[in-house]
Amino acid sequence: MPVLTKYVIEGGYKLRGEVTISGAKNAAVAIIPAALLVDGTCRIENIPEIRDVTLMLDLLRDIGADVRLINRNCVEINASKIRTTRADYDMARKIRASYYLIGALLGRFGSAQVALPGGCNFGDRPIDQHTKAFKLLGAAVDVQNGYVIAESHGRLSASSIYFDVVSVGATMNAMLAAVLADGTTIIENAAKEPHIVDLANFLNSMGANVSGAGTDVIKVRGVKKMEGGAYTIIPDQIEAGTYMAAVAAAGGEVLVRNIIPKHLDCITSKLLEMGVEVTEHDDSLLIKRTKPLSNTNIKTLPYPGFPTDMQPQATVILTLANGMSIVTEGVWDSRYQYVEELRRMGAKIQVDGKTAVVEGVDSLTGAPVRACDLRAGAALVIAGLAANGITEVEDILHIERGYEHIVEKLTALGAHIRMVEDNIPVAKAQ
């Protein structure tokens, strides 16, 4: 199959129609390794067909799990014949979520060797809170030759874990490690994101005893074993928010289907402030933008605050809003690497540390740009949809990591977007 290297977008077309949201990426990449904790077969439904999920499934196959794709959105996993607890170095480095293998393998087999993770590059994201949890549960943890090596003698032992900072990854990894430990583990200052609740629900459906997920204190009562079963992953909050942002920036009217509206409240409230119309239904939202956008201020915070994973997409909307807006990044350092690319398209943004001052312009202009990470790439696609002229987005593998069939979904909404191969001349879309 030829390598697809860029998206080509002809902007200026309003979006209209319906889009169905896929399963949550951030839930799937934790639930799939969680299947390693289960005796028997797990059937996981509503998995998104994205690169990060494919990599995670390949990692499980490589260590000996029986992984069977039932269809493109359903997989069955049986971990009864795991032959090694050492994950392939090169494969693990390609995906940030490979660190969930540590908690799952350690919890089930008392041993894990997993490369320090990769994924998006937008600043230092240490795993010290993860290793802190593993050590409190009785494991010895070391880093050697690029691997995180975690070992325990027998079953892990329950403990009280207090995180120094709110960390989604560390919260989930502590849950994975603790479900088969002896005793009751209490996780304090836990993250509250929807995918944490989804992981807890998956674990409980397989026989674990996890309570408090979605609050800042989670209790994990260790069980002797977990049986197989079936589970359906929740819809992707960030994918839904991205399509909502695309309508806000490009204009039009789109019904965003297969969502949990409550998970999107923080995004919906900001769109309303910007003058976007949002009508809520049971499992869908109607997004409509027909009038000029208004400026607003945004600060990213852990859930239920405004998601850091929606910050780049929201910033694109604000580049087209009347007046001046201030965006404050309250979670990660260095998440404004995409700003220089937006400036190529005519955006007026000044960054000082974790704060970006956005001065709205009348319009953006298409330009060649490069995706530096997953959500930044999505933001550049949105900018291309709203811009005048042709935008070429390179390094699309970042975007393919987290968005299922994004070109097909946007095309169905009336966007003029396509993939092109290397060295093929780019012609204006017809």
Image: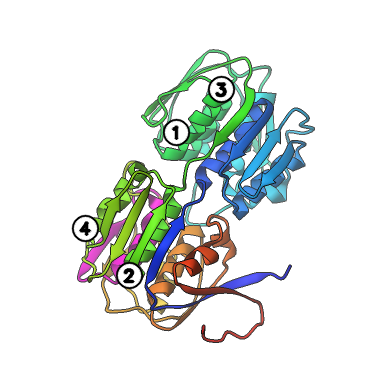
Asked if the residues shown at circle 3 and circle 1 are in contact, with their CB atoms under 8 angstroms apart, the answer is: no
Q: Quadrant of the N terminus?
A: bottom right
Residue under numbered circle 2:
251
- Disc 1, SS: helix
Asked whether residue 102 is in view, the answer is no
Cα distance, mark 3 to mark 2? 47 Å
- Residue at 57% across, 37% down: 31
Q: Hey, what amino acid is under mark 2?
A: Gly
Residue under numbered circle 4:
273
Earlier residue among tags 4 and 2: 2
Query: Is disc 4 surrounded by few (<14), some (14 to 19) or many (20+) residues within 10 Å?
Result: some
Closer mark to the observer between disc 1 and disc 2: 2
Q: From which residue to which does the magenta span run?
A: 307-331
- Disc 3, SS: loop
Residue that sits furthest to the top in the current view? 183
Cα distance, mark 4 to mark 3? 42 Å
- Disc 4, SS: helix
Asked if the residues shown at circle 1 and circle 2 are in contact, with their CB atoms under 8 angstroms apart, the answer is: no
Residue under numbered circle 1:
197
Q: Hey, what amino acid is under mark 4?
A: Glu
Earlier residue among tags 4 and 3: 3
- Residue at 34% across, 52% down: 285
Cα distance, mark 3 to mark 1? 14 Å
Of residues 344 and 378, the one drawn nearer to the viewer in this rendering: 378
Answer whether residue 127 is magenta in the image. no
Answer whether residue 326 is magenta in the image. yes
Residue under numbered circle 3:
179
Q: Hey, what amino acid is under mark 1?
A: Val
- Residue at 64% across, 70% down: 4
Query: Is disc 3 surrounded by few (<14), some (14 to 19) or many (20+) residues within 10 Å?
Result: many
Closer mark to the observer between disc 3 and disc 1: 1
Earlier residue among tags 3 and 2: 3
